[in-house]
Image (cartoon, helix red, strand yellow):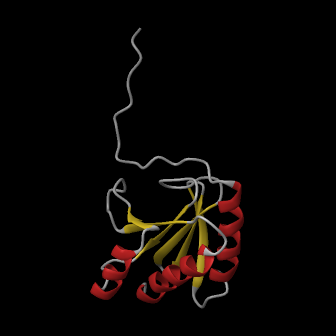
């Protein structure tokens, strides 16, 4: 009997999060959970953060998206000034694999990136009203 192939989907690959990224995500998550009207829910190996009912970020718990050291933030629509800044930031890329293409990936390389990651997550939080 022939094995049936599963239909291809546009789902992104979800590699395991690196141990470093798990630590960084934990630190970022502790900060995000202090912000007003923020709630967190697990989803597909990530911890998703909401402002009220609007999702604005996702941090790796066991899985990551794109690379083992990436987090995601959602700013849709992105204001022109932020779009320009994101375009100049080598650690940010638009998620090409996600169907909605509303998400941006932020690649963490060192603990020094925590400040900038938090800045971008704050931008997403502020615009998720």
Q: Is residue 115 visible?
A: yes
**On the image, which quarter does residue 21 sit in?**
bottom right
Q: Quadrant of the C terminus?
A: bottom left
Above-or-below relation of 105 to 5:
below
Residue at horizontal 47%, vertical 74%? 55
Say how many tags the image has: 0
Q: Nearer the viewer, residue 110 or 42?
A: 110
Residue at horizontal 41%, vertical 8%? 1
Q: Nearer the viewer, residue 73 or 6?
A: 73
Q: Is residue 27 left or right of residue 81?
A: right
Q: Is residue 52 visible?
A: no
Above-or-below relation of 67 to 83:
above
Residue at horizontal 60%, vertical 91%? 36
Q: Is residue 85 left or right of residue 24?
A: left
Q: Position of residue 92 (x, y in %)?
A: 43, 68
Q: Position of residue 20 (x, y in %)?
A: 69, 60
**On the image, which quarter does residue 25 sit in?**
bottom right
Q: Position of residue 80 (x, y in %)?
A: 27, 85
Residue at horizontal 56%, vertical 55%? 64
Q: Is residue 125 left or right of residue 98?
A: right
For this orientation, the residue located farthest to the top is 1
Q: Nearer the viewer, residue 55 or 27?
A: 27
Above-or-below relation of 119 to 109:
below
Q: Position of residue 101 (x, y in %)?
A: 32, 63
């Amino acid at each position: 009997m022939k094995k049936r192939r599963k239909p291809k989907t546009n789902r992104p690959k979800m590699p395991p999060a690196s141990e470093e990224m798990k630590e960084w995500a934990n630190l970022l998550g502790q900060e995000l959970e202090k912000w007003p009207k923020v709630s967190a829910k697990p989803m597909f190996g990530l911890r998703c953060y909401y402002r009220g009912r609007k999702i604005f970020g996702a941090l790796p718990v066991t899985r990551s998206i794109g690379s083992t050291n990436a987090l995601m933030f959602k700013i849709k629509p992105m204001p022109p000034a932020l779009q320009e800044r994101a375009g100049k930031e080598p650690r940010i890329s638009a998620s090409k694999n996600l169907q909605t293409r509303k998400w941006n990936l932020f690649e963490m390389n060192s603990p020094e990136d925590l400040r900038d990651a938090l800045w971008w997550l704050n931008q997403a939080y502020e615009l998720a009203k």
